Amino acid sequence: MAVPKQKRSRSRTHTKRAKIYRTVSVPISKCPNCGQPKLPHRVCLHCGYYNGKQILEIAE
């Protein structure tokens, strides 16, 4: 059975657990076609364009 050689300090344990709950901020870019904010490398949900091509038909 695997048994740790030394006791882990409380601060080491909390530091390791803090990484699990840390939030990651997602960079938001502007759509070059309509100027609305969108996630990078994804189709714009407002106009349906990605990489200069229309991918989705958006009903207005």
Image (cartoon, helix red, strand yellow):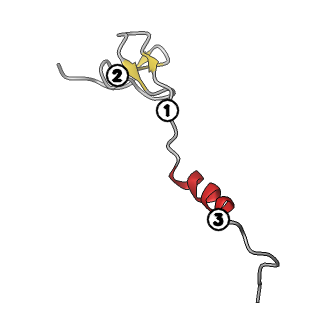
Mark 1 vs 3, N-terminal side: 3
Q: Which residue is mark 3?
A: 10
Looking at the figure, which quarter contains the N terminus?
A: bottom right
Question: Can you name the residue that lies furthest to the right here?
Answer: 5
Label 1 or label 2, whichever lies nearer to me, is 1
Crowding around mark 2 (Cα neighbors within 10 Å: few <14, some 14 to 19, many 20+) is some
- The answer to which of 58 and 30 lies nearer the viewer is 30
Residue shown at 39% from the left, 24% from the top: 55
Calculate the distance from the C-alpha at mark 2 to the C-alpha at mark 3.
50 Å
- Side of 54 where 25 appears, left or right: right
Residue 23: horizontal and vertical position, in percent? 49, 43
Residue shown at 50% from the left, 52% from the top: 21
Residue 2 falls in image quadrant:
bottom right
Q: Which residue is mark 2?
A: 48
Residue 39: horizontal and vertical position, in percent? 44, 28
Looking at the figure, which quarter contains the C terminus?
A: top left
Query: Which amino acid type is shown beneath numbered disc 2?
Result: Gly
Query: Which amino acid type is shown beneath numbered disc 1?
Result: Val
- Residue 26 bears which disc, if any? 1
- Side of 24 where 16 appears, left or right: right
Helix, strand or loop for disc 3: helix
Label 2 or label 3, whichever lies nearer to me, is 3
